[in-house]
Image (tube, rainbow, N blue to C red):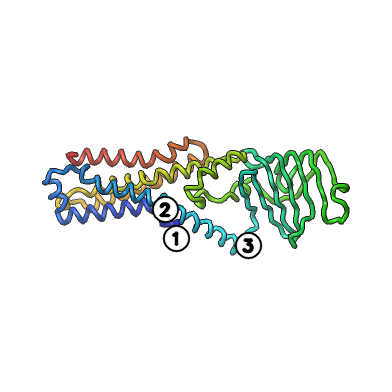
Amino acid sequence: NTPTIMYRMLPLLVILSTIALFLGLARTSEMVVIRAAGRSALRTLMAPVVTTVLFGALAVAAFNPIVAATSEQYAEISRQYQQDPQSVTTVGDEGLWIRQGSAGGQIVIRAKRSNPDGTRFFGVQFYGFNGDGDAIYRIEADEALLQPGYWILTTAKRWNFASGSNPEQAAIRQAEMTVPSDLTRDQIRDSFGSPSSIPIWELPGFIEKLDRAGFSALKHRVWLQMELANPLMMVAMVLIGAGFTMRHTRFGRTGLMVLFAVLLGFSIFFLRNFAQVLGENGQIPVALAAWMPPLAGIFLSLGLLFHTEDG
């Protein structure tokens, strides 16, 4: 799980690196020489900003898939150690598949589509297996409604394979049929996995599949936009760190300026996380949740630079 933690902490590492860089330049009076040569503060920042954009783009394009793979592996290992029997949901071009595990066997459910909250499925097929992996029954239904403790199947037909007789002749048709289940809506929704466990290159296709299956892809859309905005977030951190530490050390209050830079950087970082939660719950638009925090940080830092420097 270490790559995931490091990846999420990149903006904070960027601001700490920026503070260290400009404090070093200020102590050696190199910033004074640069300013005496006629270069403005903004022109001085061009190289760090461009470097940060390239680094951020490389992190999203190359490091993100590595983090996604390690995150998925970490989740799988955690489930094995916890012996968690929760369901596994897979979304494909032909619909969605749900595997419900239990002590007596497994039930595999295939559905053409679902409602957004994952409680009602349409065009469903249930495949029951015993503990040895042998098929014991198959059910087809027009609709399946998830209730606490069971499924309610509408216009259902069941074939039993364990009796030894002709399954078609012994098939049962019912207008309404129930199947025991320990699944909940939250388990089905969470079984898709975290958006962070999906490489950014595969996210657009996965979102499209979720939409076709009828599930809400809001959380994945917010994550995709936040990943695209990550380089801009790092630029905001560079500008914030530079805005407070480009001053020469002879002006004093260096420790206080460093503290202000760190506090503002952490505030923007936590504002981003708060906006992500609001976006995932649909309380603010996706674009606003992803792009507002880095843009706010950039504009605040530029205002500080224009105020303290001659620009």
Q: Residue furthest left?
A: 36
Q: Is residue 264 visible?
A: no
Residue 132 lies in quadrant: bottom right
The amino acid at mark 1 is Thr
Query: What SS does tag 1 mark?
Result: helix
What amino acid is found at the position of numbered circle 2 in the picture?
Ala
The residue indicated by pointer 3 is 83
Instruction: Reply above or below: 125 against 71.
Output: above
C-alpha separation, residue under disc 3 versus residue under disc 2: 33 Å
What residue lies at 35% left-to-right and 39% top-to-bottom?
Answer: 295
Q: Position of residue 156 (x, y in %)?
A: 79, 42
Please tell me which of labels 2 and 1 falls first in the chain: 1
Which numbered tag is attached to residue 307? none
Which of the two discs, 3 and 2, sits closer to the camera?
2
Question: Residue at the spot x=28%, y=45% of the render?
Answer: 239
What kind of residue is marked 3?
Answer: Gln
CA gap, disc 2 and disc 1? 16 Å
- Any part of residue 125 in sight: yes
**Side of 208 relative to 185 (left or right):** left
Residue marked by disc 2: 62
Q: Position of residue 161 (x, y in %)?
A: 82, 54
Count neighbours of disc 3 (C-alpha within 10 A) and say few if under 14, some if 14 to 19, many if 20 or more: few
Q: Position of residue 56 (x, y in %)?
A: 36, 49
Which tag is nearer the camera, tag 2 or tag 1?
A: 2
Q: Residue at x 53, y 56 (%)?
A: 72
Mark nearer the N terminus (3 vs 2): 2
- Residue under the point 38% across and 51% down: 58
Of the pair 72 and 24, the residue shown nearer to us: 72
Q: Quadrant of the C terminus?
A: top left
Quick one: label 1 or label 3, which is nearer the N terminus?
A: 1
Disc 2 to disc 1: CB gap under 8 Å: no
Task: Report the disc number at residue 2.
Answer: 1
